[in-house]
């Protein structure tokens, strides 16, 4: 972890972006699972020969319409979550860019006011910044557990956990700039 407040702030933004993506993923997976379970129950009910006045033609037509509606619903949720992921990326990138710009202003302020003033402010604020980063890390871990619980399989977390490398790479680039 860098000693730069900018790098810590960028890490915090990245962590919350990752937690947001995990929550979107949990919503997508949970909604898909619920729709599939409801579809299974509905299909078994319609396929039951005990339904009065429902012949095979009507049964087939009802099941076909149901499958189409379920597909539309699941597809809509997938598109909505893709858009949510894109929005999270834009917000995270915009915030990161803003932090970098603020860092550039801070450098100019440091040259005007002198390094001791900025170092004192950094020293005073670094513990709170690091605490914020630890909290953000705990939020990410909690969101991963939620995805695992909703998905009830380990594989679903893999897709949600991949952006971590990108977040850390962005933070390193920002610290280097």
Image (cartoon, rainbow, N blue to C red):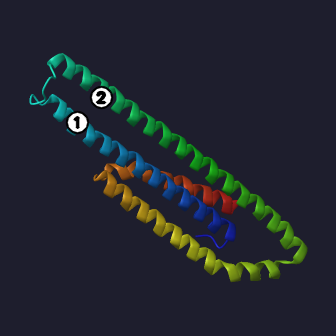
Residue neighbourhood size for the residue with mark 1, other residues' Cα within 10 Å, grouped as few (<14), some (14–19), many (≥20): some
Q: Determine if residue 168 is in view.
A: no
Q: Where is residue 71 in the image (x, y as percent from the top left)?
A: 36, 31
Along the viewing direction, whichever of 144 and 115 lies nearer the viewer: 144
Tell whether 98 sits left or right of 170. right
Where does the image place residue 35, in percent across and percent down from the top left? Answer: 32, 41
The secondary structure type at the circle numbered 1 is helix
* Quadrant of the snapshot with the N terminus: bottom right
Judging by the rendered image, the residue that carries numbered circle 1 is 42
Left or right: 139 with respect to 70? right
Q: Residue placed farthest to the front in the image?
A: 53
Could you tell me how far apart the alpha carbons at marks 1 and 2 are, in whole angstroms?
Answer: 9 Å
Spot occupied by residue 131 in the image (x, y as percentages of width and height): 56, 76
Label 2 secondary element: helix
For the point 42% across and 65% down, which residue is it?
Answer: 142
Q: Which of 144 and 101 lies nearest the eye of the viewer?
A: 144
Residue 157, can we see it? yes
Residue 66, numbered label: 2
**Residue at position x 90%, y 73% in the image:** 112
Above/below status of 133 relative to 116: above
Q: Is residue 83 left or right of residue 121?
A: left
């Amino acid at each position: 972890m860098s000693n730069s407040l900018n790098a810590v702030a960028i890490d915090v933004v990245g962590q919350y972006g990752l937690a947001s993506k995990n929550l979107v993923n949990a919503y997508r997976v949970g909604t898909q699972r619920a729709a599939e379970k409801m579809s299974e129950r509905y299909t078994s009910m319609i396929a039951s020969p005990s339904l009065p006045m429902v012949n095979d033609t009507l049964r087939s037509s009802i099941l076909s319409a149901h499958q189409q509606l379920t597909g539309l619903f699941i597809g809509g949720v997938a598109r909505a979550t893709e858009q949510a992921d894109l929005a999270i990326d834009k917000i995270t990138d915009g915030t990161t860019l803003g932090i970098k710009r603020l860092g550039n202003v801070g450098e100019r302020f440091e040259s005007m006011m002198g390094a001791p003033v900025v170092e004192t402010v950094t020293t005073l604020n670094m513990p709170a910044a690091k605490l914020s980063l630890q909290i953000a890390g705990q939020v990410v871990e909690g969101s991963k557990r939620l995805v695992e619980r909703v998905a009830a399989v380990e594989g679903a977390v893999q897709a949600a956990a991949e952006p971590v490398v990108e977040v850390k790479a962005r933070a390193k680039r920002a610290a280097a700039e």
